[in-house]
Image (tube, grey):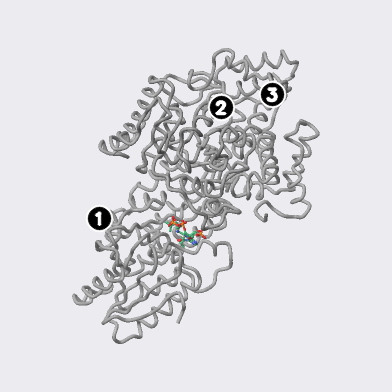
Amino acid sequence: MSEVVAYTREGNVGVISVNYPPVNALSHAVRAGLVSALEQGQKDAEADILLLVCEGRTFIAGADIREFGKPLQEPGLPDVINAYESSDKPIVAAIHGTALGGGLETALGCHYRVALASAKVGLPEVKLGLLPGAGGTQRLPRLVGAQKALEMITSGNFVGARDALALGIVDAVEGGDDIRQVGLAYAQKLAGEGAPVRRVRDISDKVEADKGSDVFDQFRAGLAKKARGLFSPFKCVDAVEAAFTLPFAEGLKRERELFKECMESPQRAGLVHSFFAEREVSKVKGLAKDTPVREVKSVGIIGAGTMGGGIAMNFANVGIPATIVEVKQDALDRGLAVIRRNYENSAKKGKLTAEQVEERMGLIKTSLSYDDFRDVDLVIEAVFENMAVKKEIFAKLDEVCKPGAILASNTSTLDIDEIASATKRPEDVVGMHFFSPANVMKLLENVRGSKTSDEVKATVMAVAKKINKVGVMVGNCHGFVGNRMLHKRGAEAMALVNEGASPQQVDKVLTDLGFPMGQFAMSDLAGIDVGYRIREERRNAGEDVPASWMDKLVEQGRLGQKTQAGVYKYEEGSRAPVVDPEVEQLIESFRAEQGIVAREVTDQEILERCMYVMVNEGAKILDEGIADRSLDIDVVWIYGYGFPAYRGGPMFWADQVGLDNILAAVKNYNNTVGGEQWKPAPLLEKLVAEGRKFSDL
Ligand code: 3HC
């Protein structure tokens, strides 16, 4: 008998139970075990009906993603499912936790499905660059029709048990939490009724009803925008369509072919890397698994601006009260009004009820005094980037806050150690860098200072999880991981325009790569006065910062979206960048002033200079230990800056481009463009010399 799948009998029910922690993924051992347990059940003369049930926290959560890219070991999942569907004894799948991907497909191969009310089902393969490849695209439409199947399969979204019941995906929903008992009772009931074998492949009414419908073309048209640049959503539509144009067996074959195409696509590799990287970042190097975590039951926030307000919302959303402190009442009132507007917009979109809006607003308090921070477990400072101000704030916090409170700064660039030096408890000081808009962006860059204690590091990582962010622990340097790389890209983009490219050409290269917006559209969103102030400060500090056409824009009052004009112009109420001839003229006259003769800049050069400069910086960041692993950098970019997950993040992408190609280009730009940013990173040179990749580190 297989270790991971057992066959036992209770009364007249043959029980096939899967026990393969953590999520009962369909590894080779599970697939083989399922087949042999089925054979036992078929042979067992005392068993009138069979029950498939899982141990642990969930039903089967899908194919074993770790086996992707390796040679398939028989039996393949479609054969396993076919054997279950072909069984002449009825089989019931009892679902708890999540039945996902191959897990739901297995359940669809069974003849009846019962689920706990807390269970969820879904076909999330598309999120891994795949399509359901074990009959899901053929069986699900037979139960729910074309439209719903397309929605579920192209979005990968989960459906709760009650909705699954309404849709006909499951046959019964029960309360409680003992899935084995629920499954047994349901199987016994069916056996008592003499319920027959009922195969989804033979159900045809929905298929007949939707035959020849234009839903597929409509869906493709809708996806053109939503799934821009993606490969597998379109293949999902092709596969579902096959359920309506081909007999079942041929539909399965077509699904298999399309699945194989997806499996071999680079997007699948990128998305699977992103899936594991997102989970891996929570395991911080050097931090013991059992490091104690402090309880965070209340937070204080300094600053009611866009950042402070967004941060407060994250906590209120999960029921943690937040107190915002500002120096002036009108700043508090303005901040609170913005928060309310955000919540009300969510309510308008149906994402929140009116009661939920009030509940969350009720959790956000405001105050003009630091005294209200006496009892909070965590304070996050979110004021503008000025070291003197921040140090003053931390000195005050040190006086007011209780022992053991965590003192965090949302700084995006400044030195955490210097901020910590303003307190007598540097071990409790840490960076928590949220990304704008803080209530939306999933990244939380947690920055460790040289004295930050392990307990504080573990706590801020746990806080990230609690507020539904992806936390990445990084080291302390100017700009940390994300902004340090972004600043290099920004400077290069600006230089490319100096030399002859247009801002829109630079942006298009980046959006074609899959970024949601280009460098300049993003600068306009954040406000181009931010970069201006940084350049001015550096100039004042005696650094040689070259003049820029962007400085001229700021000097004309064009600050970005907030003034409806920056690098682009914006129509009233619109966020869509529009090319402005005035800016084109300004750039031309800037070039003339500087004696620059514009040259043609190719898209390839833009791609290389914007992206390779980041990769080179990323290698330096790794070498300095600012990021522990290349996947930490990848996750920062995917969740903080919208790097396309299907390319796996900048470092994974670099591995695919070939580090030798990148190094050759870096050396070339070191000679032609010059500057610190083009000095080849020693780690990049080392990896190329050793024939290794970032992901081998
Ligand atoms: N294969 C292998 N490992 C898996 C896995 C899978 N399908 N799903 C989860 N894991 C691993 C995770 O990597 C993690 O490992 P770690 O502890 O070593 O980091 C562990 O299981 C727990 O996962 P989470 O941290 O994500 O746990 P949660 O409880 O937060 O979430 C989950 C559980 C909802 C099941 C989530 O893990 C998930 O969404 N998994 C992926 C589901 C999926 O995409 N299934 C489809 C696979 S493709 C397929 O089935 C193809 C078929 O059509 C032929």
- Against 356, residue 466 (above or below) is below
Crowdedness of circle 1 by 10 Å Cα count: few (<14), some, many (20+)?
few
> In the rendered view of the protein, which quadrant contains the C terminus?
bottom right
> Measured from the top left, where is residue 122 in percent x and y?
38, 56
Q: Which of the numbered marks, if any, corresponds to residue 190?
A: none
Q: Residue at x 45, y 31 (%)?
A: 308
Work out how far the residue at label 1 is from the one at label 3, CA to CA, in angstroms: 59 Å
Give the image quarter of residue 171: bottom left
Can you identify the residue that label 3 sits on? 500
Q: Residue at x 70, y 42 (%)?
A: 620
Can you identify the residue that label 1 sits on? 166
Residue 206 can be seen, yes or no: no
Going by the numbered disc 3, the residue's amino acid type is: Gly
Mark positioned earlier in the residue sequence (1 or 3): 1
Crowdedness of circle 2 by 10 Å Cα count: few (<14), some, many (20+)?
some
> Measured from the top left, where is residue 224 in percent x and y?
46, 41
- Secondary element type, mark 2: loop
Marks 1, 2: nearer the viewer:
2
- Secondary element type, mark 3: loop
Can you identify the residue that label 2 sits on? 385
